[in-house]
Image (spheres, coloured by chain):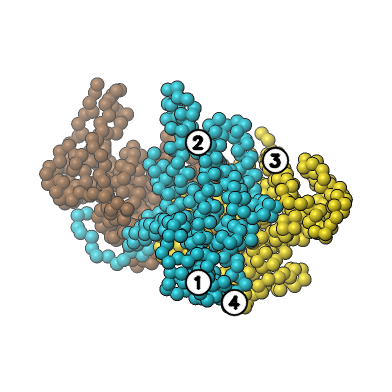
Chain colours: A cyan, B brown, C yellow
Amino acid sequence: MIAEPRAQPPQARGTLRGDAVAAHRSRSQRLGAAQLLDWLAVTYLVLVVLAALAAEYLPGLAAPTASVGEFSQAPTLTVNGLLGTDALGRSIFSRVIYGARASLAVACIATAISLTLGLALGMLAGFYRGLIERIVDLYANTVASLPPILLILGLVAATGPSLFTITASLGILGIGTYARITKGGVIAQAEREYVLAARALGAKDSRILTLELLPNLLPTLTSVVPPLMAGLIVTEGSLSFLGYGIPPPTPSWGGMIAGSTDLLNRFPLLIFGPILAIVLTVFSLNTVGDRLARRISLREGQL
Amino acid sequence: MSDPDAPLLDVEDLSCDIDTPVGVARVLRNVSLRLAQGRTLGLVGESGSGKSMLIKSILDLAPRAARVTGRVMFEGVELTGMRAAERRKFVGRRVGVVLQNPMTSLNPVVHVGRQIEESARYHLKLSKAQAREVAIDLMARVGLPDPRDSYSHYPHQFSGGMKQRVTIAAALACEPDLLIADEATTALDVTVQKDILDLLQMIQEERRMSMILVTHNLGIVAGRTDEVAVMYGGRIVETARTNALFRSPRHRYTDALLAAMPRADHAAHTTLRTIAGQPPDPLQPLAGCPFAPRCPVAEARCADSMPPTTFEAADARAFACYVPRTLVAPPPAEVH
Amino acid sequence: MRSTRVLYLRAVGLRLLAGVPVFVLVTFAATALSDLMPGSAAQTILGDSATPQQIATLNAQYGYDQPLLVRYVGWLGRLLRGDLGQTLYSQQSVFGLLLERAAVTFEIALLAMLVALAIAIPLAMLSALAPGGPLDQLVRGVSSVMLSVPIFVTVVVLGFIFALVLRWLPATGWIALTSDPLGNLRQVALPVMCISVSQAAYFYRVTRNEIVATLQEDFVLLARAKGIPTAYILLRHVLRPSLTPVLAVFGLSMTYLLGGSFIVESYFAVPGIGWTLLSAVKIHDLPTVQGILSVVVVVYVLVFMLVDIGYSVIDPRIEIA
């Protein structure tokens, strides 16, 4: 029992070992790579937001409608030629940045609408239950029964494409999702002791809602916002692709892709810019959302 | 390759280290034990002493992140170094396993008949009909009512005790030479525990199987085992014939364990003795005896270096302790 | 003790009932939308050169001059009699049109799902056997990226590769399955590919996580202890319990596909429900729009009901009530 273990031939390993502890060697590498990815995603998003906000002040960046050179040129190492030029000689890079402005504006404003109204309605529905809950459920189910893009498509077909229409409809349709999530969170939290304690102390409902419940709902909500925003960007992109989205001359990623499809066989690189932008943005938002979600589940697990 | 005089199971210097996010856990340290044919071994220890990991390491079921070193021989055949698939096939045919929680040991979406017979079907190459008969026969053997009907029932249709009988039946399908019951009765009601243990004992006697009963409950090993091995902190601290161990333990931990047992011959309102302190942390193993921090008579050298193993052939005993108990009767229990 | 049959019927009935208000809301909204259009539908049909009398006559004929509620109730009434009306321009039966087009979309959706499952499940199993290993990391990374690619990007890229560059597949058009199966297969390939790419990524993710969890169960440990081969354990013991969430995802996906496939359909000029809806919306063909929306909502309710029932089939422990 006390002798040193002899040198042994390597143990034959089985293959059916699906357990959660990762293989020893690559674990530290894996954690490092995942963290790096998360930070890259955040950096990219920050850059995109800054670029979109300060587009006019970026040195050397041409206006999205200005012609900067030959038609459909391949990417060069100049500021304006970074992603090439489109069929009308405009800088794709510039149009991508201004397109970011449009997409992000739609996504952010719509999210703001959905989040505030959804949060309010969800809290009321989860706290008071009864009729409000029925209404909120009905609304959420109705909205969920059709892809939002269909409903907006119909609306835009009827009233014509406009930034306002799209943003407002996305905002209103999104209320259901946030309301449902909030409601679920409130119902789960309402059973917990700190709420009962607050009630026992005679706190008013509004106080309980804002000071006790809300802070505990925020982590879940924040982890859900990035992927939902990514969904909005995709929806807006799809609408623009079909011609029912952001109206020209404002550049939009979906519109840029749609506009280049005719010329693909001769100038395939035309779509590279907007595709890269949209995929990177959606991917980064999803990654950030994943990271936040993991953080929360770790915290909850420790309770 | 098989040696008829060799012990059924021969574990030599088995160690197991597991890589965790916070360091390397030394779960097993230089464990050696032997089990002869037809004998029953009780493997006793607290939670975290490494007894389940010992079983898993012997059967090559340790988690991915575990590194196992040492030698395991079964019926004279060396298992370590065998290719994984070969080893699994060899061991699966000869060793039956019963786990602790009958609720989770059975696949909820597969009917029990199949779960009982599948080992036999595969290893013994039985046909569907033959396997079915074997399963029904086993179900009757372990005391399940209406085997022909119950064959196609699902696990959730059985009670806890019945489920455990199902797992025992499944473990016996290939007529194994060794049955390992890892805390097989811990999750059951006390009345059912006795029935299950009696069943295991009866089957063992019938088939002259060897058996390992893994438990934290000394009461279980008392009348039902030939030998006992006591584990603490990943090491085996003492092994001996059961009667000898109970009559006069040598290692201090065994002594403390026995003293903590409530006994029928204690007077009413006897204060139960506990063992002060915490179990050892596998992430920070001591150089010396793992029980040293909690031992009432530990000396300085106990924590510094691992005591050498002392053998006492009379009781087939082996223990590692610098200050073992002398062979006297245990102190009388305190009475209030 | 109620018989299982009664329980099943009750469950089905309740779910169908819950779908009714949703149905009413959606179809009512569709009717209301037509009010927002500039000019009337009649004007759109007759064109710019129509005289006010012609417009008025057409309006009266179709009932467009009546208030919203009346129009809606009228439509609902006809619906309950089985009459979905006729398309605005070609006077074709909406019902007949729907059947024709729905069959196309259904074929594509079903094939896409099957392809996605065929790719996702084996990959998920392989990944789950070595979580954190190189294959797992690679496939997970790829699937994350694929989930971030919008469908309209996928159609452009895949269309480019397969139709323009490699010229293996036709870019547009449709050949009915009944008339020429092989030709149909060539037409269906691109749409199916595009849809199955993101579906596969989604299924893969869900299945992989579920299998990893199942593999940690005691009964898998026991099965390994019995010495049974890995493949058997995977197929007979692991797969079935892991499929439950896949079923839910499957159900959800089907519903979205039926309505949301129009990007794929319009790009590849495939005459399915989505493309029909798109065209109908463009030309303000209200009867068709309402017909399609009704069908989509009904399918949604049915699919969710089937998913619920499916749960209890896969896992005998789950009761339907």
Q: Label 4: which residue?
A: A265
Mark 3, Cα crowd under 10 Å, few <14 / some 14-19 / many 20+, is: few
Q: Label 3: which residue?
A: C21
Q: Position of residue B280 (x, y in %)?
A: 25, 44
Q: CA distance from mark 1 to mark 3?
A: 55 Å
Q: Chain of mark 1?
A: A
Q: Do the residues at pointers 2 and 4 share their chain?
A: yes
- Between marks 1 and 3 in the image, the one whose residue lies nearer the viewer: 1
What kind of element bears circle 3? helix
Q: Are marks 2 and 1 in contact (CB under 8 Å)?
A: no
What kind of element bears circle 2? helix
Q: Quadrant of residue B193?
A: top left
Q: Do the residues at pointers 1 and 3 share their chain?
A: no
Q: CA distance from mark 4 to mark 1?
A: 23 Å
Q: Quadrant of residue B86?
A: bottom left
Q: Label 1: which residue?
A: A68
B22 or A170: which is nearer to us? Answer: A170
Q: Chain of mark 4?
A: A
Q: Chain of mark 3?
A: C
Q: CA distance from mark 2 to mark 1?
A: 55 Å
Determine whether B107 is above or below A7 in the image: above
**Amino acid at dot 2:** Val
